[in-house]
Each structure stands twice: as C-alpha cells, then as structure tokens.
Amino acid sequence: MKHYDAIVIGAGQAGSPLCKKLANAGKKTLMIEKRWIGGTCVNDGCTPTKAMVASAKAAYLAKRCTDLGVTIDSFHINMKQVKKRKDEIVMQSRNGGQKAIEKTENLDLLFGEAAFIGPKSIKVKLNAGGEEEVQADLIFLDAGATPVIPEIDGLKDIDYLTSTTILDLDEVPEHILIIGGNYVALEFAQMFHRFGSKISVLERGERIMAKEDEDVSEGLKQILVDEGLDIYTKAEVHHFEKAAGGIKASAIIGGEQKEFKCSHVLLAAGRKPLTDALLLDKTGVELDDKGFIKVNEKLETNVPGIYALGDVNGGPAFTHIAYNDYTIVYRNLIEGTDYKTTERPLPYCMFTDPQLGRVGLTEKQAREQGYEIKVAILPMKHVARAIEVSDTRGFMKAVVNAKTKEILGAAVLAEEGGEIMSVLQMAMEGGITYDRIRYCVFAHPTYSESLNNLFMKIED
Ligand SMILES: Cc1cc2nc3c(=O)[nH]c(=O)nc-3n(C[C@H](O)[C@H](O)[C@H](O)COP(=O)(O)OP(=O)(O)OC[C@H]3O[C@@H](n4cnc5c(N)ncnc54)[C@H](O)[C@@H]3O)c2cc1C
Ligand SMILES: NC(=O)c1ccc[n+]([C@@H]2O[C@H](COP(=O)([O-])OP(=O)(O)OC[C@H]3O[C@@H](n4cnc5c(N)ncnc54)[C@H](O)[C@@H]3O)[C@@H](O)[C@H]2O)c1
C-alpha cells in the first residue's frame, strides 16, 4: 500500500488549493477526485450559473434599453450560444485547475472514487479501471454535496431537472415549475424567465429566502413578481404525472389544491452531503443527524488527523467558506497558527438581479441576541448612481449597535449589492463605526457614496 503524508479527497474549493499548498510545504500529497477538478463551484455551481446570469442580464437590458433612449429592433435568445459560452468558461477553469495540480511537485492526482478500508487507509476505484490502495497520516475530506431529490409521489415517472442538469439545456423551456425558493431556485428562476420561460416557483415555507429579515425577502419577492415570475409560498407539490405535451403537478398552496401544467420541473430543494461512498464507518468519523461530517472549530473530525472541509461539514455552503476552511486548516497545521471557524465573518451574495448582498446579523437575529440596535434603511430610488443607471429597485439596510456605533450586519438588495455589502463588511472587520462612514469621503457618484446617506438615516 502506497504511503503519503497527506491525502485530500475531493478537488473542490477547499481541496484543490489545499493539496497544492501541502505539497509545496514538503508533504508528499495525493489528490483523489472522482469527477472533475474544481468541484461544484467550477463545474456546476457558481461559475456556470454566474456566466448564464450575465447572459440573462443582457437580455433584460435589451428588453428595457428604450428606457435609456436606445432602441433596438428586436433581439432573440440563442440558448446554444449561451450554453457554449458558459461551457467555455467552465472548461477554462477546470482545465487550468487540473494543469496546476499536475505540475505541482510532490503531488499525485488520481481520478476515481475514494472509500475508507481502514482508519487511515483508502481504496480508490479508478475511473480508468482498476483499484489502488493508499494510506496517509493526514486525511482531508472535501467531498461536497449534491442536490436533494425530495420524495414526491410520481417524481420518478417524470424527467426532472436539478441544478446540474439544467445547465445542459440548449433550448429555452416553455414553463419551468421550480421546487424551492432559495438561492438555487431564485437564481435559475429569474435567469430562465429572462431567457423567455414562464416560471412558477413553489416554496413550502412562509417566505422565499426565509432566513432573511421579512422586509428583505418580501422586497425581493416583489421585485421578482414585478418582473413577471409567479411565486407561491406555503406551497407543496404532492403529485407529478406526465400529461399531454408536458408534466402535471398537483400542489397544496396555502391549504388550497392547485394544478399546474408545465414543460419542465427543476428541483431546488437543498443539497445533501456526499458521504455515503466514503464508507466512513471504516474509520470511525462521526456524522451529525443530517449526514454532515462533524468537526470542531478547527475542522478536525473526532478521528485525530482527519479533517472535513467545505459543504461536507455542514457549515455555510458557499465557495468562500470552503476556501476559508482550507486556509484555516493549512495555516494551523503548517504555520502553527490558531485560527477557528467561529471567528470569521459570513458574507454572501445571491446573484439575482438586483443582487442580495448580506453580511453579519439580520435585524431579527440582532434583536434576539439582545443587542440595543438602530436600523438604517435607504431605498435605492434615493441613490444617485441607481437613478443614473436606471435601476432603482431594492434598498440598503444596516443594523448597528446603538451603544458602540458598530455595524452588526447589512443587507443590500441592489444592483451590485454584493460589492456594496463588501464595503460594509470591510468597515465591520476594521471596526469603523457608522458615524465615521456617515462623513467618509467616497467618490461621486458611486453606489458606496450612498453609505453616507444610509447612515444619515440614524438619529444619534
Ligand atoms: C447552482 C449552484 C450555484 C452556486 N453558486 C454559488 C455562488 O454564487 N457563490 C458561492 O459562494 N457558492 C455558490 N454555490 C455553492 C458552492 O458551489 C459550494 O459551496 C462549493 O462548491 C463547495 O465547495 P466544496 O469544496 O465543499 O465541495 P465541491 O466543490 O462540491 O467539491 C467536492 C468534490 O469532491 C468530489 N468527491 C466527492 N466524493 C468523492 C469521493 N468519494 N472520492 C473522490 N472524490 C469525491 C466531488 O466530485 C467534487 O468534485 C453554488 C452551488 C450551486 C449548486
Ligand atoms: N449565490 C450563492 O451564494 C449561491 C447560489 C446557489 C446556491 N448556493 C448554496 O447552495 C446551497 C443550496 O441551495 P438551495 O437553494 O438548493 O437550497 P436551500 O437549502 O438553501 O433552500 C432550499 C429551499 O427549498 C425549500 N424546499 C425544500 N423542500 C421543498 C419542497 N418539497 N417543496 C417546496 N419547497 C421545498 C426549502 O424550504 C428551502 O427554502 C445553499 O445553501 C447556498 O449556500 C449559494
């Protein structure tokens, strides 16, 4: 059995950079990946979706360019070209990532599925055929997650789409019924609506993006409804069947029965960890009740020397968090630091248009945690930049500590909301209080300049 200093399972957003850094630090390292380098983010997550969101935005702007004094005779969506562009961007990233691993000294790469056969021993079922057994003192699990397929009567009898398979469409569907009302559902919903599909979003909770403050999720819902999407909450499909020319879905919405006829169904009901194939019982690594790998605040499992990073450990499922997991583990092990996951901020951005950039506490969380707070809200229709570019949808919201004047959290529902949120995140990390930002000199007319006015809304 070949021995390594370190084995990394999964070439996702934590595993890919980690294996290269470990090898460069002198550890004889093996990367095992069963699919493609780059994992979900590069191949069927962030990269392809944000490439397609950009195409959808071009369609949106083409549709409303007369508002800005530009008339075009007509436009149409070439879905094959949208897909080709997306595929090229994905392949560039995937191939670049693979080359970088292959040229790293001290680092081996095996394409195949890894499963434990002993506490620190792994069998790899090679994609090219055959098997290889390997062992290491340090093992890093970055196996990621996969779409949940909900148990709905009749689902197995229809062809449904997931966030992965929808990326292969090269024609615009007529009517997509989407199960779920969070990130995956809403990004695809708006994107395909802009390409020309009729969209029905069915979220079983009381609200879309239910973890956000009510004004934020309601504000976003209104924007999407104004754009022409049908959004149903307290909605649950209980039966699917094939119907002439499409699919029939029977749902209960707010206690009432409703039938839908659609051409496609997209499942966007969450993701589950990819742990089954790892046969973790052979090594004693513990899972939580949802099947995620249990880790401590330094990302080590209950088995010393085995770490779990990224989506598979049940932390926030974002690329930047998986990447940060890698930096915590790497720096603690190789540079002797003492970083913990509990000490990092949690920014994120949903790439609807307008975006929803979020960081820190929501208003509800801040109140629940007993802070004495003040809340600043600035509608985008009062923002010079938004008026000039003709996109005044949404608002900026910040929650501040009334005593210390520190910013506790922010939600920016705006064009480039993710970038504006990041400015506030930097202020939070640097301890810059809202009363300073109120008089900070920003370039005119940027979106960030409006942070002056946002904090003018707070009475000291
Ligand atoms: C449609 C969509 C859009 C998204 N958009 C965003 C976004 O805009 N911003 C953002 O921050 N996040 C986004 N995410 C989430 C983001 O993609 C994930 O949080 C991120 O990819 C997690 O990285 P990871 O390293 O944990 O796992 P992954 O990237 O999933 O990598 C895990 C890897 O492990 C491999 N693997 C699994 N089991 C084995 C095994 N037994 N043997 C060998 N290899 C194995 C898999 O093949 C995979 O390559 C999106 C997700 C989806 C689905
Ligand atoms: N821009 C981004 O950062 C981005 C984009 C896409 C995905 N992601 C990540 O991927 C993860 C997965 O996203 P997601 O949106 O698939 O999952 P999610 O877990 O965030 O949301 C799933 C939604 O589906 C609903 N749901 C579940 N079962 C249902 C049913 N049977 N009928 C109706 N509704 C149902 C849930 O109530 C929930 O609102 C997210 O947690 C996010 O971290 C991030």
Image (cartoon, rainbow, N blue to C red):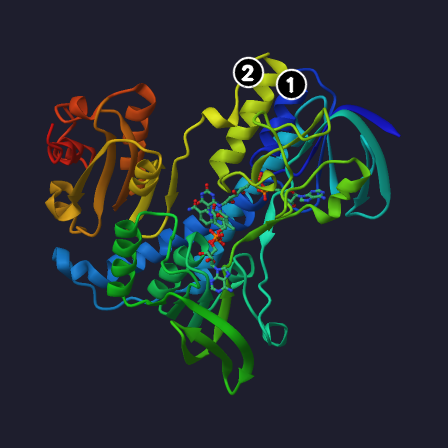
Residue identifier under label 2: 338
Depth check, front residue: 270 or 441? 270
Q: Where does the image place residue 239, in percent across and percent down from the top left?
A: 54, 77
Q: Residue furthest front?
A: 370
**Left or right of residue 133: residue 192:** left
Say which label, 1 or 2, has the lower sequence index. Answer: 1
Quarter-of-image position of residue 406? top left
Examine the rendered structure and indicate whether residue 148 appears above or below residue 342.
below
What residue is shown at x 74% (from left), y 48% (from top)? 277
Examine the rendered structure and indicate whether residue 375 appears above or below residue 177.
above
Assess disc 2: are there few (<14), some (14-19) or many (≥20) residues with their C-alpha within 10 Å of its C-alpha.
few
What residue is shown at x 40% (from left), y 73% (from top)? 253
Quarter-of-image position of residue 300? top right
Q: Where does the image place residue 326, in percent across and percent down from the top left?
A: 57, 28
What residue is shown at x 57% (from left), y 37% (from top)? 310
Q: Where does the image place residue 370, in percent across and percent down from the top left?
A: 32, 33
Residue 115 in view in this figure: no
* Camera-side mark, 1 or 2: 2
The amino acid sitting under disc 1 is Asn
Q: CA distance from mark 1 to mark 2?
A: 21 Å
**Does label 2 point to a residue whose CB lies under 8 Å from ligand 1?**
no
Depth check, front residue: 418 or 284? 284
Q: Where does the image place residue 60, in percent across and percent down from the top left?
A: 28, 59
Residue identifier under label 1: 24
